[in-house]
Image: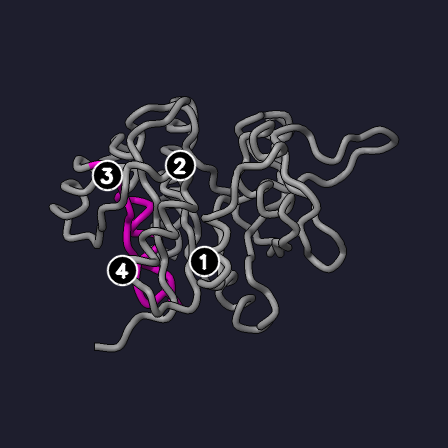
Amino acid sequence: MPQPQIVGIIPARMESSRFPGKMLTDILGKSLIQRTYENACRSKFLDHVVVATDDPRIYAHLAQLGGEVVLTSADCQTGTDRVAEAARTYFPYSQIIVNIQGDEPCLDPQVIDRLIERMAQNKEYEMVTAAALIHDEERIDSPHVVKTLFDQNGRALYFSRNRLPFPYKREGKYYRHIGIYAYRSSLLGFLSRLSATPLQLTEDLEQLKVLESGYPIYVEVVDDQAIGVDTLQDLEVIKKFICKKKENIYSSQEA
């Protein structure tokens, strides 16, 4: 059987400082992790999609649904560590690994495909992520919404929970960082062995470790306004988003 070359791995854990147990939280009849998994499976370019967890409850839940799920060590400190272990153990011959955050249930699968296409078109790129323009003023100042800056060539300059850039002389454009990464397998293995860095610990943003260690992250700007689930309040926003999306589908079918 041929080995998958492009693999989507969804790291999932039960512990969360802001929202414990959120992966199994019900969202209109489906769990958060089920929605994320099913969305990722709609990607055109992923050869394989799997959830990586250290929690037997998440494992049993996905297995019962017929989803692909693997167990990883409880010693994984970050999502990248969990994705790297799953890739190393179960997909050692993969070329590109896509790290899909388990709390992004409404991520458009086209975003996944855009990152994969970007990697295929630019052989020198080793890590690509995504960002979307923020239209809601309240989200700009929310510490739960990570902002990013990037240069004119699409290389990330910084990621922050704060307003970025600061409007000292004029208001700028603000981009939400979407929690998804595509890596070359060789870089992923190396990143998982890096020690934590000062800015990473200050902002509690793992991607800053990559920048602080001197490795570029390229940013693909996409049109995706779905949000992740960080708090209980986010659940209500997600439910409205899903309902609105269904209404639009039904309206299109009737037309």
Task: Decide which of tag 3 and tag 2 comes sooner along the chain.
Answer: 3
145 in magenta: no
- At x 42%, y 57%, the residue is 98
What residue would you read off at disc 4?
Answer: 90
Q: Which residue is mark 1?
A: 112
Question: Which is more N-terminal, label 3 or label 1?
Answer: 3
User: Cα distance, mark 1 to mark 3?
Assistant: 22 Å
Q: Nearer the viewer, residue 253 or 99?
A: 99
Residue 192 in picture, x, y percent from top left:
45, 48
| Residue extending farthest bottom | 2
Picture layout, residue 33 above or below residue 136: below
Query: Residue 45 in magenta?
Result: yes
Name the residue that disc number 3 marks. 30
**Residue drawn at x 31%, y 63% as measured from the top left:** 91
Question: Which residues lie in the magenta part?
Answer: 34-55
Q: Give whichever of discs 3 and 4 has the lower sequence position.
A: 3
Mark 4 falls on what kind of element?
A: helix
